[in-house]
Amino acid sequence: MLFTVRHILQIKGSDIWSISPEATVYDALRLMSDKDIGALMVIEDDHLIGIISERDYARKIILQGKTSRETKVREIMSPIEYTIHPEQTIDECMDLMTRKRLRHLPVMEGDHLLGVVSIGDVVYSIITRQRRTIRKYESMKPGERES
């Protein structure tokens, strides 16, 4: 059985935490803290236009001497370069995230944002799948594993 991104969303839910590009970075950080997440989707006129992450804050506010209360999300957000669709496999998702050094990927079906998958979600899914496989093999009688 192939495990897909849709499976991850079914397990974790499809809550999408987002913010306007005109909000302050401070407001974005407060929302991330309240929701215990590392990134927010930036939505304008019902369209996904970017992502703001803790990494954006560290690199584009702190290191550049800006203030989070005066800087708009639009000024430091990252553009959406990669998305995934819900039928992609978890292995494909892990490969993309690893190769492109991504921590969060929007899950899109056409122009509709279904959810967000984090690297932690993907790793958890892979570990869960491996545990099931191990339990399956451990429960087999000797000789059943060769076939």
Image (cartoon, rainbow, N blue to C red):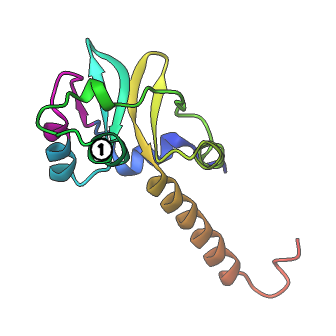
Eyeballing the image, is 60 above or below 74?
below
Callout 1 secondary element: helix
Give coordinates of residue 93: x percent, y percent. 59, 44
45 up-or-down from 61: above or below: above
- Comparing 45 with 12, the one in front is 45
* Residue at the image position 22 percent from the left and 47 percent from the top: 32
What residue is shown with label 1?
57
Label 1 CA crowd tier, 10 Å (few <14, some 14–19, many 20+) = many
Residue in the foreground of this view, choosing between 65 and 117: 65
Residue 145 in the image: state x and y as whole percent. 82, 77
Left or right: where 119 falls relative to 114: right
> If the image is split into quadrants, where does the C terminus sit?
bottom right
Q: Amino acid at mark 1?
A: Tyr
Residue 39 drawn in magenta? no
Position of 39 compared to 127: left or right? left
Q: Is residue 25 magenta?
A: yes
Q: Nearer the viewer, residue 71 or 6?
A: 71
Left or right, residue 11 beside residue 110: left
146 displayed left or right of 83:
right
Part of the protein shown in magenta: 17-28
Tell me if residue 139 comes above or below residue 6 in the rendering: below
Tell me what residue is drawn at x 24 percent, y 29 percent: 73
Q: Residue at x 20, y 27 (%)?
A: 72
**Residue 99 image point, x, y percent:** 65, 45
**Residue drawn at (37%, 26%) of the image:** 50
